Amino acid sequence: MSEPASKIESQKEIKQIKDMGLDQGVARLTPEKIEKVVNEVLENETGARLKAYVESCVHCGLCSDACHYYVSRKDPIFSPAAKVKQTLWEILEKKGKVSPEFIRRAAEVAYTECNLCRRCAMYCPFGIDVAYMMLTMRRICHKLGVTPQYIQDTAHSHSATMNQMWVKEDEWVDTLFWQEEEAQEEIPGLRIPVEKEGADIMYSVIGPEPKFRAQLIYQAAVILNAAGADWTMPATPGWDNSDMAMYTGDNEMMARLKKEHFETATRLKVKRIVMGECGHAFRSVYDMGNRALGWKMPPVPVVHALEYYYELFRAGRIKVAKKFEKPVTLHDPCNVIRGRGLHEMTRYVVNKTCENFIEMTPNREHNYCCCAGGGVINCGPPFRDKRVVSNSVKADQISATTKKGVEVVIAPCHNCHGGLEDIIHHFGLGVELKFLGDIIYEVMEKPE
Amino acid sequence: MHTLHNLVSGPLVWLAFIIFIGGSIYKLVTMAKEAKKKDPLVYEYWDGNYAFRSILHWLTPFGSVNWRKNPVLTLVTFAFHISVILVPIFLLAHVLLWKESFDISWWYLPEAAADWMTLIVIFACIFFAGRRMIRKDVKYLTSSSDYWILAMVAAPFITGYWAHHHWPMYRLMYILHILSGEIMLAAIPFTRLSHMLYFVFTRGYIGSEFGAVRHARDW
Ligand code: SF4
Ligand code: SF4
């Protein structure tokens, strides 16, 4: 691998991408409707913060190099401030008098060209939060009915089933029993305690786990049991902590989802919620969903898997039989690192479980996003190529570690997993991808 | 010429200061009120310590990762901002005016230093304008108002330097100097120059969010 693999295709132009949700949504718009909805949102839902951001942006471009889209493509339209220029600046300047075509482009920018990763807020001298402005744009699009089809489908699923993947209630409970049985073949007597009132912990996962990655529930059960945790999982809706409504701009639905989640924990009388390795779900429970409900901090303490693993290893509740041998690197997921500062705890666990840990650079708060987050991967196949070539810098980052011998990338987040999988495949990086839980499960001493 | 001089150095000075101070207070108060009503979370999550921590890092040359990644821009930016604030306040000629008018006075800059700092401001403005033309991403973000603002800031320094060195037509330049200075001052609250007023709040707020809620650094 001489020339970074990423250079190959990154210049490929991606023309306007067809998407049924966006195209049909825009076809229904009239200038009057746009103006009305835009001004409603701006008037009722935004205020001083947006104004201060727009008025004090000095158009300096210091945020450009923060954004993996820009760093990968070098196209000025991908600079964070440029995304605001293509959306809210124009809308504010024209007081909502913009055309349906403008909204089409603005929606594509807000939904598929920004991961809401907040890296640029750390590079702008004024701390201007572009992610917040892209969310505001998404809010407008949601109210206009202009949302990408795939992510809108998951939002529909949330509102019909209270989970992201159209999982029916009996399917959910069946999955738990199925994983319990599987695990019992390895560890007889292992239980996945369902509906145990008064347990210390409610363990919650995202919709795609029972659907596509059920073995993660199995692994979590093994870890929690080995640690002697007093835990439970709910049998009712509220088990899913994920939240695509937060990313479509459907704030009402975001609030409903989190209400259900917190109320389930309260019904089970648990002391805290421990959640699986997911970034966006953590953002929803810890940062955005609770706020939508009027809770400054989550009403039930929320602990992300990374922090929980750290707790277990600190207390010596998990023993390592034999450390993981292949050299590993770590991808820091935005929503739990920039979003919760779990970077040192994660490194503690990686060092406890792996022989040879090699950092990728930049790392910790400064790591580049996977380009799947913020709902971008959930916008589905139409936008897949764009998000992959728009993150060639991630491919470069990973291939720099493989030169040092890295064979495994640990990505402790579902979205990052999806995004990195595509990047590794597309750029032929030849590394394996694992959750931190995969590693722990592999190296831990398991009860007989 | 004489009446013009009297006008710009008399009533217009008052007007400029009234607009600058009054406008700034008005802007900040209306923003604060609106935030209270519509963005109460700014107050909820504001944390003095973390806000200060973030502001301090960004007000220190090379104190943030991004400052370190752009060393030339960082040097120019800091030299520019320090000069653009200090020169008008501590220039001997200005201090003397305050002394004459209100019998108050304070420390002043050595003349050579003030001269250099004026040149720094002028060349920094040229540098910023050049950057706007050359860097593709900055060019994309730039609108004509960005050049006007640069011109507006450079004008009092160019004319002041000119007048001070008694170059041809320096009397006219002197009048233009006062006038352009007044325009700049009055424009602060109502143009993008208001970044000067909002910096503490936007930076402080993101610093509070990152520090107190997200337990992460933001520099
Ligand atoms: S993807 Fe991240 S860095 Fe880029 S504009 Fe969005 S929030 Fe900023
Ligand atoms: S968002 Fe910040 S860094 Fe980006 S152009 Fe505006 S002021 Fe500069």
Image: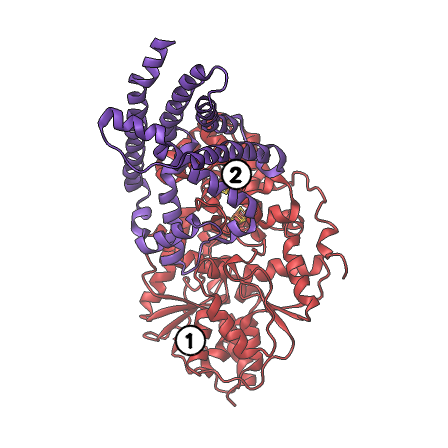
Neighbours of disc 2 within 10 Å: few (<14), some (14-19), many (20+) = some
- Image quadrant where one finds the N terminus of chain B: top left
Chain seen in purple = B
- All told, the count of numbered labels is 2
Q: Which residue is mark 1?
A: A311
Residue A445 visible in the current orientation: yes
| Residue located farthest toward the bottom when viewing the structure as drawn | A448
* Distance between mark 1 and mark 2 Cα atoms: 43 Å
Circle nearer the N terminus (1, 2): 2
Q: Quadrant of residue A18?
A: top right
Amino acid under label 1? Answer: Glu
Left-right relation of A274 to A11: left
Looking at the image, can residue A41 be seen? no
Q: Which chain is red?
A: A
Q: Chain of mark 2?
A: A
Q: Within 10 Å of the Cα at label 1, are there few (<14), some (14-19), or many (20+) other Cα atoms?
A: some
Query: Whole-percent x and y of residue B6?
Result: 32, 13
Residue position for label 2: A60
- Disc 1 with disc 2 on a shared chain: yes
